[in-house]
Image (tube, rainbow, N blue to C red):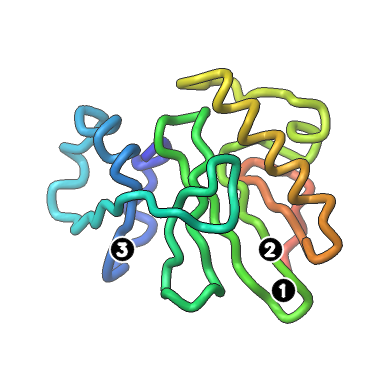
Amino acid sequence: MDHISGIHLLEGAKKFIVSEKEWNAAKDYQIARCKEIDFHPFSLQPIPFGPYQLGKDLFDDGLVYLVFTPGHTPGLISVLARVEDGWILLASDVGYSQESWNHSILPGYTSNDQQALESLEWVKTFSQREDCVAVIANHDPFVKFGIY
């Protein structure tokens, strides 16, 4: 819910999902802007990925996971998607670029430094897997447009 002020850019989306942890932490944060949006908080479940192995198998088919990667915010979620050659990790705001997880550089704001470091370490470890096709951060200026 960190960047919720841009939610109007997703007009027409049928459903917005958010972790219960993020939802509970963000209840007083700009929710007035979102009165007409249908949010669907989900509870964390055991999954085979992430620093805490918690999240959600989005379609219950093992192809897209919402991975609990807290630290920047209490309920931050990254997205892990299975592609033909392996996995693409959309690391959200765990770190702002590859340099963040390679050198343990925390985001400018954290709700919990220890969790942020653990999430960064998990992203770094995951990025080194042979089946990791790409790790993309929300703020990475070096991401090139295209299909991965």
SS assignment at label 3: loop
Q: Residue at x 76, y 41 (%)?
A: 124
Spatial separation of the CA atoms under disc 2 and disc 3: 25 Å
Comparing labels 2 and 1, the label whose residue is closer to the camera = 2
Crowding at dot 1, Cα within 10 Å, few <14 / some 14-19 / many 20+, comes out as few
Q: Is residue 21 above or below residue 91?
A: above
Observer-side mark, 1 or 3, equals 1
Q: Quadrant of the N terminus?
A: top left
In this figure, which residue is indicated by the disc labeled 2?
A: 88
Is residue 58 shown left or right of residue 95?
Answer: left
Tell me the residue that label 1 is attached to: 147
Identify the amino acid type marked 2.
Ile
Disc number for residue 11: 3
Question: Does 34 appear above or below 29?
Answer: below
What residue is drawn where x is 27% and y is 40%? 23
Q: Nearer the viewer, residue 142 or 78?
A: 78
Residue at the image position 28 percent from the left and 65 percent from the top:
15
Give the camera-side residue of 105 and 86.
Answer: 86
Is 105 situated left or right of 44 in this image?
A: right
Residue 60 position within the rendered picture, expressed as x and y whole percent measured from the top left: 42, 74
Instruction: Give the mark nearer the N terminus: 2 vs 1.
Output: 2
Query: In the drawing, what numbered circle is on residue 46?
Result: none
Residue that protrudes farthest toward the bottom in the picture = 84
